[in-house]
Image: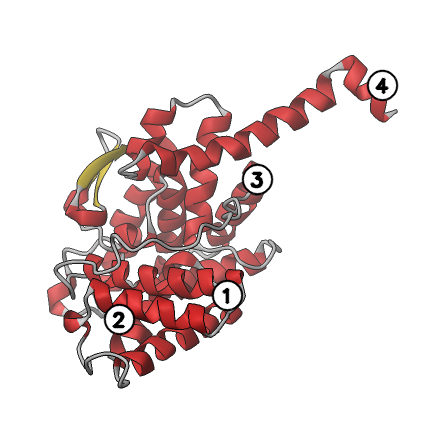
């Protein structure tokens, strides 16, 4: 059971960019769940597949009895629900036992995103590396920002998934749902350069079974989520961007910038692969802030108030 928890924590680090403190808290929360499942309070459970809704509810009730602060209780419930969603998405469980379990409602912080200037500064960093890994890195970052893909979707791409002449990329999202996302000509050109000049050099040292993967590491194997996260972290540091720039921040930046430039919300939903429009609507809050700032800066009377 501990291995699945560690895999989940690695996912939160690489895919979601969770901080060390949050990861430690989630680790403690899930360890507390494991301890509860092995206690006398429920029938001893030693496999995640044996956890049912009743066990989850019993665990949450036991936390309430210990009189945790509402915010702490909400976090622990969120950690458990997020963990079981991960197990289900990874195919480890057939059904999520927490799906119908209510949890305390908390206000979620708005997604972090970069300005267009910050994104440009980030994308300029790999240009200075003329080696095959530099060509690869530039193609990866351009493709992330051009499509808003999740990091797992990007590293899962195969060569056949990019249609550069047509300007589309096919990716496999959550629930094994495939979607097509447009890519602009500059991104297509950068990916083509990588395919013709960068990737062949990486395959020379490569493993025989990885030839279909689009993005390879220096051993010629498919690049991992953690590998991409470390690469991005290095370039963000070079660009002197604030801490916490993750692949998901580029996804947020893509969505925010598209809506700021009047893209249709339904189109953005489709590009991001969101099942529900409500998930995409969080970005409208960010664009409203942008509109408010632009209004205050431009309107004569609003400007006079500041002066």
Decide which of tag 4 and tag 2 comes sooner along the chain. Answer: 2
Q: CA distance from mark 4 to mark 2?
A: 61 Å
**Which numbered mark, 3 or 1, is in the foreground of this view?**
1
Of mark 3 and mark 4, the one earlier in the sequence is 3
Residue of label 1: 72
> Counting other residues with Cα less than 10 Å from the Cα at mark 2, is it few (<14), some (14-19), or many (20 or more)?
few
**In x, y percent, where is residue 266?**
33, 25
Specify the quadrant that holds the C terminus.
top right
Circle 4 sits in a helix, a strand or a loop, which is it? helix
Q: Is residue 166 left or right of residue 117?
A: left
Residue underneath mark 4: 304
Camera-near label (2 vs 3) is 3
**Earlier sequence position, callout 4 versus callout 1:** 1
- Residue at the outermost top position: 300
- Distance Cα–Cα, label 1 vs label 2: 43 Å
Look at the picture and state if 128 lies above or below 118: below
Mark 3 near mark 1, Cβ–Cβ under 8 Å?
no
Tell me which residue sits at (43%, 54%) in the image: 104
> Position of 213 compared to 137: left or right?
left
């Amino acid at each position: 059971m501990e291995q699945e928890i560690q895999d989940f924590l690695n996912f939160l680090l690489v895919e979601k960019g969770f901080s060390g403190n949050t990861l430690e808290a989630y680790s403690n929360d899930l360890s507390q769940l494991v301890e509860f499942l092995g206690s006398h309070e429920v029938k001893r459970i030693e496999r995640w597949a044996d956890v049912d809704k009743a066990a989850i509810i019993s665990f949450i009730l036991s936390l309430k009895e210990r009189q945790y602060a509402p915010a702490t209780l909400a976090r622990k419930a969120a950690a458990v629900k997020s963990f079981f969603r991960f197990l289900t998405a990874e195919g480890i469980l057939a059904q999520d036992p927490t799906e119908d379990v209510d949890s305390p409602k908390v206000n979620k912080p708005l997604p972090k995103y970069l300005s267009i200037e910050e994104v440009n500064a980030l994308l300029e960093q790999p240009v200075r590396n003329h080696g095959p890994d530099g060509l690869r890195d530039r193609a990866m970052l351009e493709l992330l920002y051009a499509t808003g893909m999740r990091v797992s979707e990007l590293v899962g791409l195969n060569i056949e998934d990019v249609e550069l002449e047509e300007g589309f990329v096919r990716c496999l999202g959550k629930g094994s749902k495939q979607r097509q996302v447009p890519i602009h000509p500059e991104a297509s050109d950068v990916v083509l350069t990588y395919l013709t000049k960068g990737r062949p050099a990486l395959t020379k040292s490569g493993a025989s079974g990885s030839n279909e993967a689009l993005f390879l590491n220096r051993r010629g194997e498919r690049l991992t989520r953690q590998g991409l996260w470390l690469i991005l972290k290095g370039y963000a540091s070079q660009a002197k961007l604030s801490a916490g720039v993750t692949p998901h921040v580029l996804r947020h930046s893509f969505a925010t910038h598209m809506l700021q430039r009047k893209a249709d919300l339904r189109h953005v939903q489709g590009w991001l692969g969101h099942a529900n429009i409500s998930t995409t609507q969080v970005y409208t809050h960010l664009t409203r802030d942008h509109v408010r700032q632009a209004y205050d800066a431009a309107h004569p009377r609003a400007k006079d108030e500041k002066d």
